[in-house]
Each structure stands twice: as structure tokens, then as C-alpha cells.
Amino acid sequence: MKRLIAFLLISVIAYISLPGMSLAAGEEWENLFDGKTLDGWVQRNGQAKYTVQDGIIVGTTVLNTPNSFLCTEKMYTDFILELEFLVEPGMNSGIQIRSNSFKHYKNYRVHGYQVEIDTSSRAWSGGIYDEARRGWLYPLKDKPKAQKAFKLGLWNHYRIEAIGDRIRTWVNGVPVADLQDDMTSTGFIALQVHGSKVADKKIKWRNIRIQDLSKSNKKTLKALIVDGQNNHNWQGTTPVLKSLLEESGLFAVDVATSPAKSQPMDTFKPNFAKYDVIVSNYTGADWPKQTQDALVEYMKNGGGLVIYHAADNAFPKWKEWNEMIAIGGWGGRDEKSGPMVRYRDGKIVFDNSPGRGGTHGPQHEFQIITRDRHHSITAGLPEKWMHAKDELYSKLRGPAKNMAVLATAYADPAKGGPGEHEPVLFTVRYGKGRVFHTVLGHGPEQLRCVGFIVTFLRGTEWAATGRVTQVEVPADFPTADEVSVSFDGGS
């Protein structure tokens, strides 16, 4: 009997370990298609025909129309999707996952990951394409076993697992793609009918079901705001930052307030390791070395850090801090601290000219230009948007290592600026950790800017997890010409 039990246990473990057989404990399959109607789906972009016939969704090509997408109304983050399809020869199609449609991105063009359906001799069915963005991410060149999995003229079965930053596909039980990519973590699922030069070509889908793993994977993120000393009004901004994070529904927030200026700092020892992300609203006396070392260790091990406005003025002599924030200002920073970072002629330029690090003119409204529209923090945001009356930091200097600029603003000489496009939103990689740095937000009034709110919440989630699930762009997001402010700024 013991041998029989052992054999059964080994068999179960082996079954669970098979490719495509990962289990989602406690999650049940949900049907995305009721077999009778297209309730729960919405068509976007092209005008291909989608109908229901005999319990099957049928997509039919129409001439002179772009790619068409039948999209779920519901958004998904982590999931396992299974479906079957039958496609006519000569058609190209695909299954969109974690995809989105925003007014500010190519006028609602559907974009995101696509699991390819390829009837051509290339035979890349099950490969992963990035629709309307980067193109092929996981082609099937030199993968003959995967290429043979798809069966033309027959019903084919797809299994798609999107969990964290890993996307895997199986075609008729054969492992095909295994992609790690963190550009987009949340979006709808869609059935594509590709634009075609031939009318009335058909693709059919049935048995569409999903396990929504987001329910079990979702957790409240723990955030710590650090304040207590600052040449800005931290007493006014910390409550607003805390409220914004908590009202998002994603965060539980604690605050660590340091001793006041000129008071002993040796007791200030926040337990950074307890938190998913640290938000720095601090500029003041040096922390105890033990506290500094704890933050460095936390970040090297994969922590998250948000540098908010004047926090980049802090710790000019702390080497690791300056590597974390990439660039900062004031405190005696100059050319010895590192280059200034500018955006010129479509590219990042490191400017090693001598001079102080950090300056700004009088507060004024200014236009922000989104330079990376594919990063999850800025995805779907307009290319240009106005920020509320604020300080525009210029001439920040530092090591500028592992820095990715998301957005810039032009520091106009008429407003006391140097005539350069300066970084205002950027990310930094430090060890295994992630840093989101925003120079926006002088005081509580500036925190009411809808652009600040959206980018701060997205950036904090990204720093905490490496992904952004807050993909909706508010209808009142600022335009290229008009500032938009929240009535209460989240407080």
C-alpha cells in the first residue's frame, strides 16, 4: 500500500509539472463567451463582421477596413486563457492579451501582446507579436517543433498563461513561446480579424474560457513615506501623497517622520524591509549610517523607491543615494557630481559642462512631453500635456547610471530656464531595485494636477512591483494646451 501511495503521489506531481499543466489553486474557469450572444465584448478599430452561429463566434473579413478586434469589456492582469479556433487558409489573425485602446495612442488603436495565428508557410502560430508597438517579440524561427504544432484546416487549441512578466503559449499541447516582458501588465483580451484584400474569409472561435488569477494574486502593497525634514512643505504634501496612494485601493501607507532639524538622528531607523516601496519626501540631515546601509541593502535586493520633487536635493555626498536617484540638485552639486541630462534632437545627451547642479525659475505652467510612450508608467498618456504652475527643475546633475527618461519639459529662458529639454519623469535601476523619480509637485496645490496624480500612482506601483495595473487614462487628463486639476487632490 505504501508503494502504491508513493507511486500515486509521484504521478500527480509529474502531471502537475507537465508544460501547460500549472494549477491555479482555488480559481475556477469562467466562460468568456455565453454561446449565444456577444455580451461582454465590444468591437474596436476595423469593421470586420463578428456574428454568433451555432454556439461559435465567427469573424468575417470585409474589404477596405483595417484590423478589427472583438475585445472583452473586462480587463485582465494575470490569467490562464484557453480557446479553440478554426481558420481558413490564407488568413492572418491572432489573440490579443493585455491589450489596450487609448485616445492618446494613435487615436484608440488597439495595441499590445498578440498570440499569432499564422496560416502561411512561415508557420509562426503561437508566437508573440506586439501589435501596433514593437513588432515581433517571440518569433518561431529555428523552432521546428513549435512550427509544426498548428494544424491547418482543423480546430486548434491554444493555452496562454500570462503571470507576472512571463507569457507562455501552447498550441495543441505543444510548448511554443516563453517570453519575459514587463511593458504591459493589464489589458483586455481580443479576437482579431486582420485586414484583408479578400472578402468573406472566416475564422471561428469556441470554448473560450479563462482563469482570472488576479483575484488570488492581488495584495495590498505596503508603502512607507519618509519625511520630517525638507526645505519644502512636507507637512502639507505628505498627507496628500498618503491619501492619493490609499484612495487608489492598492496601498496601505505608513509614515516615518525623522527628528527635527538639529535634533539627534541616531534613533531614526525605519524598517525598510517591511515595505514594497519607499516614497522619499525628505531633504535634510544625513541619516545614520545604519539607516543608509539598510536602504542600500533593501534596494539591492529588489526594493522600490520613489523620489518626489525636492527629495533629489538630499544627501549630495552619499554615493549610493546619488546612484539611486540618477541626478539631483543643490547641496553643492557641480560637474564633479556628474553630467546634466538633456534631451536634444530626439536623443538623450550627457552634458559635462561645468557649473552648479540644480536651479529653477519662478513657478509657472509648463508643457510636459512624453518621450517613452511604451513604458507602463506613461502608456496611453498624450504625447504632450500641461502641468500646473510649479517649479521646473533644471541643471540636475549626477551619475545618471541605468536611467530611462520617460518625459521632459522645456526650461524656457523667458522663465529663468537654460533653454534645454530637462528630464521631469524617469526611472532608475539600482541592483535588483526600481526607482521612479518625479521632479514635479512643489506643494499641495501642484499635487492636484491630474497629470501628477496619474504618473505618481503609476510610478509608485511600478517601483513597488515592476508593473502597472492602473491603465485607465482619466477623461480629464491634461491636454497639450490645458492644465487639469483634481477638485481635492485626493485629500
Image (cartoon, rainbow, N blue to C red):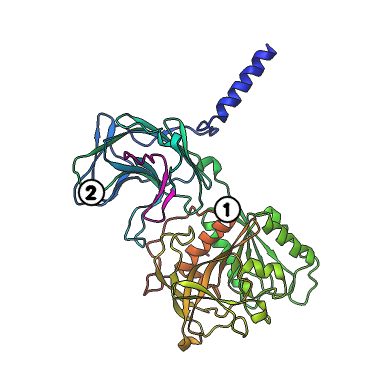
Q: Is residue 179 magenta?
A: no
Residue under pointer 2: 47
Q: Is residue 36 left or right of residue 5?
A: left
The nearer-to-camera label among 1 and 2 is 2
State which quarter of the image contains the N terminus. Answer: top right
Q: Is residue 483 visible?
A: yes
Classify mark 1: helix, strand or loop: helix
Q: Is residue 128 magenta?
A: yes
Q: Overall secondary structure of the magenta stretch?
A: loop
In the image, residue 2 above or below residue 324: above
Of 41 and 380, nearer the camera is: 380
User: Which tag, 1 or 2, sits closer to the chain's start?
Assistant: 2
State which region is magenta: 119-137
Residue depicted at 28% across the width and 32% down the height = 56
Residue 99 drawn at (x, y percent): 40, 50
Give residue 465's mark.
1
